[in-house]
Structures are given as structure tokens and as C-alpha cells.
Amino acid sequence: MTRYVALLRGINVGGHRRVPMADLRRVLTGLGFTEVRTLLQSGNAVFATAERPTDELVATIEAGLAAEFGFAVDVMVRSDAEWRAVVAANPLEVRDPAKLAVAFLRAPFDPAVLVGVDPADYAPEEFSAGGRELYMYFPDGLGKARLTPILSRRLGDGATVRNWNTVIKLLALLEPAT
């Protein structure tokens, strides 16, 4: 069995697109996944299943959620090994884990997304891309970041963001339940 992390995008924000975590666990279990655990109310789940391509898991989970809740939910999935690689590859200093964030992308990062964005114009905010992730540091917080609207617009629906605290807590959840 392989463990995976599923990140749901755009749920439980402002009382819209409600997906209670107990229901998410029930749906994932109903899809045949085991050891299902959730973190926070923002759509973070860890589960185990036979090793499968992540795009297949994404399609299965998105279909299950749409059938259960009646609306589409974008899902990003990473295997245990991929999640650990994300943590290990972080190129930014972890000064404050609440202000360090990772945008998890559906597809490999396309440098064209940031054409014309000069990092010096946004200092002391920082960003660095790698693989299917974009690492970002916002010293004044994500809500006050000048880069946030630009990145949101350019990344669109193909990304969901988690702060470093959440990334590390999900890493811990990947350990087998005792």
C-alpha cells in the first residue's frame, strides 16, 4: 500500500462549497481508500491504497466528490515519496512556517507563468519554482502579500496553496497510524 496526500481546492471558504471533513473521510473510504485521515477544515486528507498514478486518483476523487456534494472540486494528489520530496526540496529559509507557503500545481511548473514578474519588485516577498510546486515566502502574511493576486491570477484553478505548518503536519500524518 502507498500513502497519498489529497488537497482539495476552494472548499469551506466563507461558508460556500461545504465539505465537512467527516463526509470527506466517508467519501474517500467509500472509494476504497484505507487509513483515511483529515487535517483542518480546508480539505487536506491522507489515505492509503494500492500504488496508482496520481492522475487516476485525482479523477476518482473528483468524481466521488462531485457525486456526493453536487459540485466540482479540484484535487491535487501527491504520493508519500512526492510529499517528502516537496519538503526536502524547499529552497526558501523557514523563518516563520506560517508565512512560508507552497502552491501545489496540477501540472509541472511553466516558467511562462511568471514572465514579466521581477522578484526584486516584490522583495522582501520571495518565490521559487520547482517540479509541480511553487514555494513562496510572505513576511507580512499571505493576505497582505503583493504577489498573491498576481500568482492567483496566473496559476488559476491549477493550484492550491498550503502554509508550511500544514505541509509539515501532513508529512506527520503520512506515518502509519498506530
Image (spheres, rainbow, N blue to C red):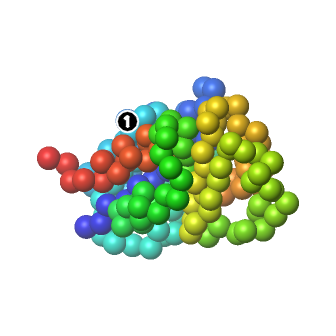
Instruction: Name which quarter of the figure residue 125 lies in.
Output: top right
Q: Which residue in the rendered view is the most extreme toward the left? A: 178
149 to the left or right of 175:
right
Where residue 139 appears, as percent x and y from the top left, is: 61, 36
Residue 27 percent across, percent down from the top left:
40, 47
Q: In this view, does 78 lie above or below 138?
A: below
Pointer 1 residue: 22
Residue 57 seen anywhere in this rendered image of the structure: no
Tally of marks? 1
Furthest residue to the right? 116
In this view, the residue in front, 103 or 21, is 103
* Depth check, front residue: 128 or 93: 93
Residue occupying the point 30% across, 48% down: 172
Left or right placement of residue 178 versus residue 175 in this view: left
Is 32 placed above or below 42 here? below
Q: Residue at x 25, y 67 (%)?
A: 1
Please tell me whether mark 1 sits on a helix, a strand or a loop. Answer: helix
Q: Residues within 10 Å of mark 1 (few under 14, many from 20)?
A: few
The kind of residue tagged 1 is Ala
Q: At 54% from the left edge and 43% from the top edge, which residue is drawn?
A: 100
Of the pair 92 and 175, the residue shown nearer to us:
92
130 relative to 154, above or below: below
Q: Which of 161 and 15 is in front in this view?
A: 161
Residue visible at 82% across and 64% down in the picture: 115
Give left or right: position of 136 versus 147: left
| Residue 4 visible in the displayed image | yes
Residue 28 x/y as whole percent: 38, 51
